[in-house]
Image: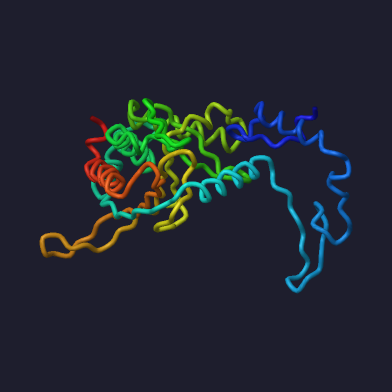
Amino acid sequence: MDLTTLEGSGPGGRIVKADVEKARVGAAVPAASARQPAVAGTDAPGAETETAKGTTTYQELTRLQQVVSRRMSESKATAPHFYLQAEIDMSAAVEARSRLKGLTPEGEVVPSFNDMIVKACALALKEFPLANGAYRDGRFELYSRVNVGVAVAAQDALVLPTVFDADRKGLREIATDARTLAGKVRDGSITPPELSGGTFTVSNLGMYGVSNFSAVINSPQAAILAVGAITEKPVVRDGLVTTAHLLGVTLACDHRILYGAPAAEFLARIRSLLEEPLSLAL
């Protein structure tokens, strides 16, 4: 069997046993039901058609894009999403990172705000095991390890490499892991094991100036945190107007396992950890 003709359903598009068995069943279908050759004017690869929209060309999805498309569709179709939004005061975190940057020797990794968010999520996940679980086959799966997936934009799709045991790692170790994984995604050397095993996901679009957005859960995980940009805004404190560095986040939850009140408490815990960044080092 030519494996290049198969669509992998495993981590990172890997071909697994079920894909081979499915292809064998498809090969047994009578020839009369086989796909007919494409004709001119159809959506054959590379074909062009002229419509009121102008010249239309067609582009086939890569194997990775096919996997992402299928999984996102399945997630929205099967997991009842609900969303919680919050605004986090990152002023103390901004100051702490500035001091860290000044104390870090040249050439060493300086933890980013996203690394702080990953660490805060990991610590909160230890306190809220349902957020670190999944709903599958009519029951809850609760995991002993806290593995946070970090969304990285690859050349043709969104990839989720995993920071394993993020709750046990320091900020610098998380920062090193995250940069190594992102580099592997971009040069195409990421491996299936590094894309699997995630129990929660963080997706950050703040670097593009996005203030807030709602993400699709990476099923079967219970939730995903969408992170926007940190912006300096006016706030009122003790009756006086001042400024603060505020971060908009949205927590998308699978209502089958994570209900409103526990989800709100989980998000509040993430906020409290980020607003007092010293707690991330304890």
The reply, left or right, for residue 68 in relation to residue 209 is right
What residue is at 77 percent from the left and 36 percent from the top?
26
Q: In the rendered view, does 123 fall on the left or right side of 56?
A: left
Q: Position of residue 189 (x, y in %)?
A: 61, 30
Which of the image's four quarters has the C terminus? top left
Q: Indicate the position of residue 278 as horizontal and vertical percent values.
A: 22, 36
Q: Compared with residue 47, is residue 124 higher up or lower down, i.e. above or below?
A: above
As rendered, which of 31 and 99 lies closer to the eye? 31
> Could you say which quadrant of the image residue 58 lies in?
bottom right
Q: Position of residue 215 (x, y in %)?
A: 46, 51
Picture quarter with the N terminus? top right
Residue at screen point 10% across, 60% down: 238
Question: In the visual, does 64 lie left or right of 234?
Answer: right
How many callouts does the rendering have?
0
Colour basis:
rainbow
At x 52% / y 46%, what residue is drawn? Answer: 75
Q: Is residue 271 left or right of residue 192?
A: left
Percent x, y for residue 28?
82, 33
Residue lying furthest bottom? 52
The quadrant holding residue 244 is bottom left
Q: Is residue 81 above or below residue 238?
A: above
